[in-house]
Image (cartoon, rainbow, N blue to C red):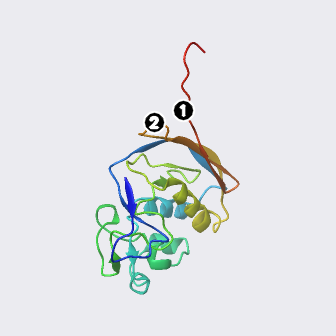
Amino acid sequence: MSDYCGDPYPDCSVWEWREVMEYTTYFSGEFEIKPPLTPEQTAYIQQFNQTRRVQRMSSKTAKRKDEIRKAVDLPVGTEGGYFVGEEGSYGQNSGQDVVNGNRPPKGQPGLWCQWTSHDGETLCWDEGVEFYDYSEWLDYLILHFFRLWGRTLNGEVAWDGEESGDLGRLVVTDNELDVQYGEVTYRSGLP
């Protein structure tokens, strides 16, 4: 796996292009949301999860239909980062406002956020494959949505990647994330 910055985006300070072979990480556990999200906030988090995060021209995006976002009083965001009104398969249609369909909006760690809430009371992994930047996405959601809405996350989610040794847990205490990396130890003999 190699990371690189390529033309026409020489400044990759926020997000770097990645050459990635399909890699899946599995998660178990959930984060409790207190107080629970409103139905409108739950719908927004679900739609955010189901929409490809792409760079947009905010001035054009603001004119588009986006009722779920508007119901939670969010602006369009930098490069259309809060927009969830795209249609088509997983919001991947390329509207006239899309600047680059293969780069996320400034400040977002990737094209897909795979954290979701089914009931408004918990935040969990959507069980989709190839979830990259999961800790960065969790920080993003806390900063941009949960704190703004007066919600507090608490809980623990363990991860286990395909490669031996890629394991750990994400511990959130009162909206503060602690990423704890695990290790595998081998020893001879009986325990």
Q: Position of residue 142 (x, y in %)?
A: 60, 61
What kind of residue is marked 1? Val
Q: Earlier in the sequence, mark 2 or mark 1?
A: 2
Query: From the image, which quarter does the C terminus lie in?
Result: top right
Left or right of 107, for residue 176: right
Whether label 2 touches label 1, CB < 8 Å:
yes
What kind of residue is marked 2? Ser
Please tell me which residue lies in front, 23 or 175. 23
Residue at the spot of label 2: 164
Please tell me which residue lies in front, 186 or 173. 186
Q: Residue at x 67, y 64 (%)?
A: 150
Number of marks: 2
Q: Position of residue 147 (x, y in %)?
A: 65, 65
> In this rendering, is residue 97 above or below 34?
below
Q: CA distance from mark 2 to mark 1?
A: 8 Å
Name the outermost residue toward the right: 174
